[in-house]
Image (cartoon, helix red, strand yellow):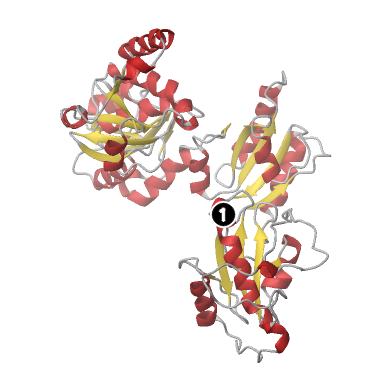
């Protein structure tokens, strides 16, 4: 049966408009019939694998379309594949989530690791179209303004720094644009004494020369210097650039502001001199407090009162919010930053109240008790860090409860515990941070080390893991008649079957 016979005429009319719109689009639609031929004939092509129902795909669509129009002038094509209609094609390219973007070079794919906004996509793909290091001559002035950050080496081809520069360029070609000038007249016109490395930016200081003698520069030193200059003195933080700040591992100072306030730009400008003073020691950002109110809560800002100021230790995930009872003035911010760097501030740790009783088979841990319970040297401790919304955590719960029931007879030696990691912060004493849910950590009795559990999540495997790593004697007391009474809610046997009704518990 033809599909059109099932569709009312009005919908067919509307669909014809959509098809016409697609025909005018600069994004090429690919199917299994034309995919291989299309990607193989292009030196460079970006392909989006999407699903029509996907919210992230819908958010990307206008940016992808705009980028396609811009890049068309540079003969770089953007394409898309509907993975609902072309499921087999998407599966053959290992698509596991939407949207998935891949860069194809004459049919050979690599993962796209760039931004998801139009200008970012354009910048990334232009870099992909160029060699790692571009020879720059008469086009010098145009080249140094062609991206947000451009790095140029002014040196002879046989200079040692040229080799070091090429190594940095090859490694960072996705992120920055690199050029090489050998012409003496071009170098002189740029006001440079060779050998020299210069970073050109469209933000902050437009031109910055390498501060040490470039003749002896090493690749690692150059890379660190460029990466430091890639971070503005203060900038808006969002999903596009957060990774840049996280990877630097420097403390991150947030200015939460309400963009609807008329003086919001003045609030940013007031903090800029402080951000510039502490550049290199701390990164400063501003964030839309209304749009990202939940992020404020995650950083332990308890009131929707703006502006607000928080310092986050990115590496240890510790938070230092300035009291929202204080005004966010340059003087107060300067004082807060200086006290942080002098280690005079204590992190604010979020914690749920300590439970009045422990009625579950698993010990319900909260932040206030972490050190007391987890670092109890007399016990082996197996801890699950979970999030209430996490599907994997919900599926693990019955098994984790059974694990608690199994070791209940020797709970004076073994603690099976769980902590809601989004409602309770890890203290500074914890030598690890949570990167995903659930996270399972085992601390042997008398040890300060934590062992990651990476096995399957069956009860048998979890019990075996405890038995292999525990320092305490795990000999169980002899069974009593009461333990064998059906339905009394005591120790459950190790079994792949469900626990008895008496051993079931509702989630908090």
x then y, percent, for residue 57: 44, 29
Query: Where 88 falls versus 8 (above or below)?
Result: below
**Position of the C terminus by quadrant:** bottom right
User: Which residue does the image show at 54% across and 45% down from the upper left?
Assistant: 280
**Quadrant of residue 368 within the rendered picture:** bottom right
- Give the residue at the far front of this rendering: 1
x then y, percent, for residue 362: 68, 69
- For this view, does 365 lie left or right of residue 278? right
- For this view, does 301 lie left or right of residue 139? right
Look at the image and tell me whether residue 474 can be seen.
yes
- Give the residue at the far bottom of this rendering: 478
Look at the image and tell me whether residue 428 can be seen.
no
**Position of the N terminus by quadrant:** top left
- For this view, does 35 lie left or right of residue 257? left
**Quadrant of residue 168 within the rendered picture:** top left
x then y, percent, for residue 466: 54, 78
x then y, percent, for residue 23: 30, 12
Query: Where 448 falls versus 328 (above or below)?
Result: below
Query: Where 440 falls versus 55 (above or below)?
Result: below
Mark 1 surroundings: few (<14), some (14-19) or many (≥20) residues within 10 A: some
Query: Where 335 falls versus 184 (above or below)?
Result: below
User: Which residue does the image show at 54% across and 76% down from the upper left?
Assistant: 463
Q: Nearer the viewer, residue 167 or 412?
A: 412
The number of numbered badges drawn on the structure is 1
Give the secondary structure at mark 1.
Answer: loop
User: Which residue does the image show at 24% across and 20% down from the upper left?
Assistant: 75
- The residue carrying mark 1 is 315
């Amino acid at each position: 049966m033809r599909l059109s016979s099932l569709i009312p005429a009005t919908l067919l009319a509307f669909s014809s408009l959509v098809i016409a719109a697609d025909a005018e689009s600069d994004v090429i639609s690919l199917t299994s019939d034309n995919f291989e031929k299309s990607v193989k004939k292009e030196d460079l092509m970006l392909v989006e694998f999407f699903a029509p129902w996907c919210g992230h795909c819908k958010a990307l669509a206008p940016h992808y379309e705009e980028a396609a129009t811009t890049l068309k002038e540079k003969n770089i094509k953007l394409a898309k594949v509907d993975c609902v209609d072309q499921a087999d094609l998407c599966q053959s390219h290992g698509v596991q989530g939407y949207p998935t973007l891949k860069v194809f070079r004459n049919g050979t794919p690599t993962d796209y690791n760039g931004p998801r906004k139009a200008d970012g996509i354009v910048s990334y793909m232009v870099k992909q179209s160029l060699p790692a290091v571009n020879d720059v001559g008469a086009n010098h002035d145009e080249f140094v303004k062609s991206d947000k950050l451009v790095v140029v080496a002014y040196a002879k081809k046989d200079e040692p720094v040229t080799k070091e520069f090429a190594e940095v360029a090859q490694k960072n070609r996705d992120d920055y644009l690199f050029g090489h000038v050998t012409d003496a007249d071009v170098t002189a016109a740029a006001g440079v004494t060779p050998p020299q490395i210069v970073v050109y930016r469209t933000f902050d200081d437009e031109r910055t020369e390498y501060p040490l003698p470039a003749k002896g520069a090493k690749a690692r030193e150059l890379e660190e210097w460029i990466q430091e200059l890639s971070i503005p003195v203060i900038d808006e933080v969002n999903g596009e650039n957060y990774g840049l700040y996280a990877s630097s591992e420097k403390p991150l100072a947030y200015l939460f502001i309400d963009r609807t306030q008329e003086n919001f730009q003045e609030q940013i400008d007031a903090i800029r001199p402080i951000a510039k003073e502490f550049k290199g020691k701390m990164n400063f950002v501003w964030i839309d407090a209304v749009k990202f109110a939940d992020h404020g809560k995650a950083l332990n800002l308890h009131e929707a009162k703006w502006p607000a100021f928080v310092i986050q230790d990115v590496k240890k995930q510790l938070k230092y919010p300035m009291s929202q009872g204080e005004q966010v003035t340059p003087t107060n911010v300067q004082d807060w930053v200086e006290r942080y760097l002098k280690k005079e501030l204590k992190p604010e740790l979020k914690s749920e109240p300590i439970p009045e009783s422990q009625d579950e088979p698993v010990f319900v841990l909260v932040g206030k008790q972490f050190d007391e319970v987890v670092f109890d040297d007399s016990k082996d401790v197996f801890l699950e860090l979970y999030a209430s919304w996490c599907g994997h955590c919900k599926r693990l719960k019955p098994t984790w409860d059974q694990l608690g029931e199994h070791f209940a007879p020797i709970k004076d030696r073994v603690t099976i515990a769980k902590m809601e990691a989004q409602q309770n912060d890890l203290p500074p004493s914890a030598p690890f941070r949570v990167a995903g849910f659930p996270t399972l950590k085992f601390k042997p009795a008398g040890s300060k080390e934590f062992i990651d559990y990476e096995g399957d999540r069956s009860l048998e495997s979890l019990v075996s893991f405890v038995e292999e790593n525990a320092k305490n004697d795990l000999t169980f007391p002899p069974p009593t008649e009461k333990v064998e009474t059906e339905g009394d809610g005591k120790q459950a046997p190790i079994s792949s079957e469900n626990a008895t009704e008496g051993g079931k518990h509702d989630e908090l």
